[in-house]
Image (cartoon, rainbow, N blue to C red):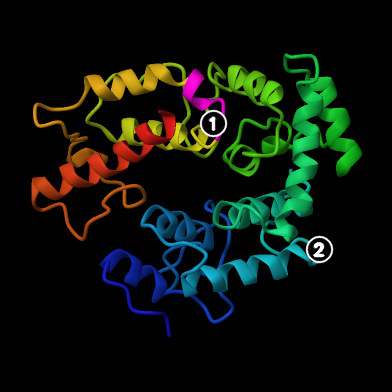
Amino acid sequence: MSTSYDNKWVQQITDLQHEDGSWGHFHTLSQPTRAQPMTTEQALRRLRILGLTKEDEPIARAIAYMQQNLKQPFPTVFHEKKHDSKTYGDLMLTTWIRLFDPNSETALVVANKWAKIISSAFKEGVYSNDSYVSAYEAEFVKMNPKAGCLADFVVFYQLALLPGLLSPEVESAMLDYILPHKRGIVYIYNSPVNVLPEVFASKNASWYLSAMELLAAYDSAPKKLGFVVKWLSDNRDVDGMWDMGAAAKDDIHFPLSDSWRKPENRRRDCTTRITKLIERLA
């Protein structure tokens, strides 16, 4: 039985947690069922947005589950022929462990390998795909030409995994490469992130904020993302708050409060989220 929480969204999610600490299938792209309407990854993302930490019992159980799976010699959470399943599965597990526990020794084993790969890829100050592939194969296995999200590191997992592990020079060069990337950030935002959304009060703008929240974890972010702070400041209302509109509700990033029936709850949620981002970019 999960711990009782005041927020109804937290309670709904924790009530679905399995005895092993998971929520069934792991990967976001796995198909939910009526009995299991969300994946482990979806549950962890939503609970983190709602403010749960490794000190909360459901997250502690989930971390223990992920650490146990990380130690397995064969892939346990990801099965897809076009990828190296073990490498990709370990990447996903390590990322989510580090998001809740950046100092996890178990997760750092894999995270440091990716830090070496990215450092090699940017060792000349600009991205070299040849150096990336060579370093990847030195740490893992020969790269499959159809390796998908392993062949291109501008992906949620790699970018969420690496804060605090790169030199200032590598980190700066990496962000310069990411910002205009034509694919955006895979799993997060599918357009170049150096181009602001056309409509602020929209679901697309909320997804854009999620990309900025990801990049804001890097020390170089305040110097690179000043244009985002200006955009946010320009969209503050006359009361000094933000309102991204009812369309921004996606059941992932919003809502934070129990209901958006009252517009003031929506404005408060939007303001809370954006204020946190601006503080990280200050």
Location of the C terminus (image quadrant): top left
Measured in 3D between alpha carbons, the distance from the residue under mark 2 to the one under mark 1, in whole angstroms, is: 28 Å
Density class for disc 1 (Cα within 10 Å; few <14, some 14-19, many ≥20) is many
Q: Residue placed at 65% from the left, 26% from the top?
A: 171
Which segment did they paint magenta? 218-224
Viewer can see residue 41: yes
Q: Nearer the viewer, residue 58 or 132?
A: 58
Residue 75 horizontal/vertical position (percent): 76, 61
- Which picture quadrant has residue 77? bottom right
- Which picture quadrant has residue 232? top left
Residue beneath label 1, please?
185
**Mark 1 residue type:** Ile
Residue beneath label 2, please?
74
Q: Relative to 234, is 34 above or below? A: below
Q: Residue placed at 9% from the left, 32% from the top?
A: 239
Q: Relative to 180, is 277 above or below? A: below
